[in-house]
Amino acid sequence: MTARITSLPVVVAGAALLAAGGLASVGGTQRAASSPAVHVRYITVAPGEPLESVVSKASRVVPSPNQLAWQAREFIAFAHFGMNTFTDREWGDGNESPALFNPTDFDARQWVQVFASAGVKLLILTAKHHDGFCLWPTATTTHSVKSSPWKNGNGDVVADVATACREAGLAFGVYVSPWDRHERSYGDSPRYDEFFRAQLRELLTRYGEIAEVWFDGANGEGPNGKRQIYDWPSYYRVVRELQPRAVIFGMAPDVRWVGTESGYGRETEWSVVPLRLREGAALRPDSPHPLDDAFVPGDLTAPDLGSREAIRSAALLAWYPAETDVSIRPGWFYHPKEDAGVKTPEKLVDIYFGSVGRNGVLLLNVPPDARGRIADADAKSLAGMRAILDGAFSTPVAGARFPKQGAAGAASAGYEIPVAAGRRFDVAMLQEDIGQGQRVEQFTLEVCTAGACREFARGTTIGYKRLLRFPEVQVDAGHHDARIRLTVGQTRGTPAVSALAVYSMGPVRPPGAPRRHTPARPRERPSVASSGSRLQAPGRDRHRHAAAGAQDFHGCGAADAIAAEQRK
Ligand code: FUL
């Protein structure tokens, strides 16, 4: 997506350029005023600070280079593969014999080919899940591929997947579960911390560049009945030292869990959110990772994380963007009985709109089977998703990239792009230049001809990317001066919208998969276009932000986690 946007005609704010197809475009407009141009990775707020000041501070918080690179990947994947693939479980108890791990036709290149052709940019492998079985020949424990019959104990899944990713130009990441139900030192906190850091060191030094390290928050009992108190800052230090360009997901201050496993982010998704600080801990303003020592993992499942109301009494605001994880199947690991439950291409497209299209990164899990290959049903569905997205997004009906907006500006701005007479469209794509922060709080989209404008969509946040679907709009055949106008109605500072485009997707049948979890939270009311037609909100109902369901245990305690396992 990002690369393709560059082919859009460019409209310079305040100037007229010639757009593709010979249509004269009207430049974006922006009213000037002054605003502080200092951008920061986080900002502290004094108790009782006026809301306007807090809002202005929030508008100046920006991503780190690592976060920016991560966000631009947009669509990334998970491969849950390991002992559970062979025991047909979701969580192992750590007592499984390594003899059970024996893929019959392992082919990491086949996985990567499936992912790469679906447009995935980064693949994260479960190097160790909660059962403690290691997919690489670690020196830290015998509970690994080394003790398995696969390749007579000479195999290394991590190496094979990392190599296949590199060959195909995909970035590579690792899921390493801190919760280890096999390791005897687990719960004996300093000893296990040492063990876990040693595992990290192996993973982060043997397999080339690691783009993401995935730390799940599940924290149950180990084999000796004890629970571990994790020394998170010491884990971050290992990652920072060995893989300075990696982002750490979850129990770390780089990338947050969106708060559901449904695949849908919030209609209003802020990347600047309040964070708690550890009592007495110091922030390190000069470090590339200034929050590491002070960060306290918290519950981020609330329906509203970043609104004016949510930041009003924050002590610290930080750039903490959402990663939206979801499995293509009901479970995270492959189970033959779930072959019929693979999400359809239409459902995956809906999820794409609900994640990438809501200022998130989509992390889609596609679990390889016991052969060690991605099953046909999953590969077919992914290819179908890609075909629909390519059909929709390869050629914009109209669009423009806006060059960097100045630091000066006012609390509202307009952007316009020309659209040819007679053209039809039903999707809009908007982007903010998040290198300058996330600011837009409310916007409307209209189609304008000879002085008359008709609203066809509206929304709240934009962030890195916002995608909207709506009933098809057709520009009258007789109107050769038609424009699409974006009006920013409310913003936290100078808006810096970087792209606006519309596309024609046609009707993708709304996937009517049954609800898996708790009832939907009330969503924002769709607006009524001046034509009288209701706008369709993409990804209608899979939110669980209001009431975290039983399986929402990223960051939860053992009781919740085990209760969830028992329900499986
Ligand atoms: C959860 C784990 O417990 C699941 O098994 C899965 O790995 C998911 C992505 O994260 O917390």
Image (tube, rainbow, N blue to C red):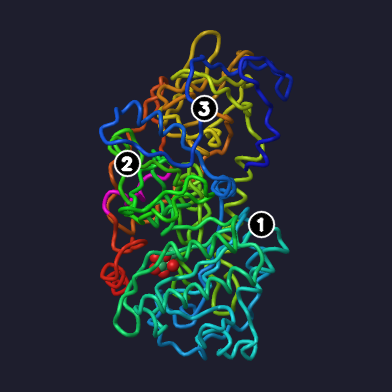
Q: Is residue 540 magenta?
A: yes
Q: Extreme top residue here? A: 451
The alpha-carbon separation of the residues under discs 2 and 1 comes to 44 Å
Judging by the rendered image, the residue that carries numbered circle 1 is 117
Q: Is 78 displayed left or right of 552 in the figure? A: right
Splitting the image into 4 quarters, where does residue 12 fall?
top right
Residue drawn 69% across and 35% down? Answer: 6
Quadrant (top left, top right, bottom left, bottom right) of the N terminus: top right
Q: Secondary structure at mark 2?
A: loop
- Which amino acid type is marked by label 2? Ala
Q: Residues within 10 Å of mark 1 (few under 14, many from 20)?
A: some
Q: Position of residue 494 (x, y in %)?
A: 49, 24
Q: Secondary structure at mark 3?
A: loop
The alpha-carbon separation of the residues under discs 3 and 2 comes to 21 Å
Which tag, 3 or 2, sits closer to the chain's start? 3
Which tag, 1 or 3, sits closer to the chain's start? 3
The kind of secondary structure the magenta stretch mainly shows is loop
Q: Position of residue 261 (x, y in %)?
A: 40, 57
Q: Position of residue 110 (x, y in %)?
A: 66, 69
Judging by the rendered image, the residue that carries numbered circle 3 is 37
Q: Which residue is at the front of the view, 406 or 457?
A: 406
Q: Is 495 displayed left or right of 550 in the figure? A: right
- Which amino acid type is marked by label 1? Ser
Figure check: 455 above or below 136: above
Judging by the rendered image, the residue that carries numbered circle 2 is 315
- Read off the magenta span: 539-547
Q: Are marks 2 and 1 in contact (CB under 8 Å)?
A: no
- Which amino acid type is marked by label 3? Ala
Q: Position of residue 166 (x, y in %)?
A: 70, 63
Splitting the image into 4 quarters, where does residue 53 fall?
top left
Quadrant (top left, top right, bottom left, bottom right) of the C terminus: bottom left
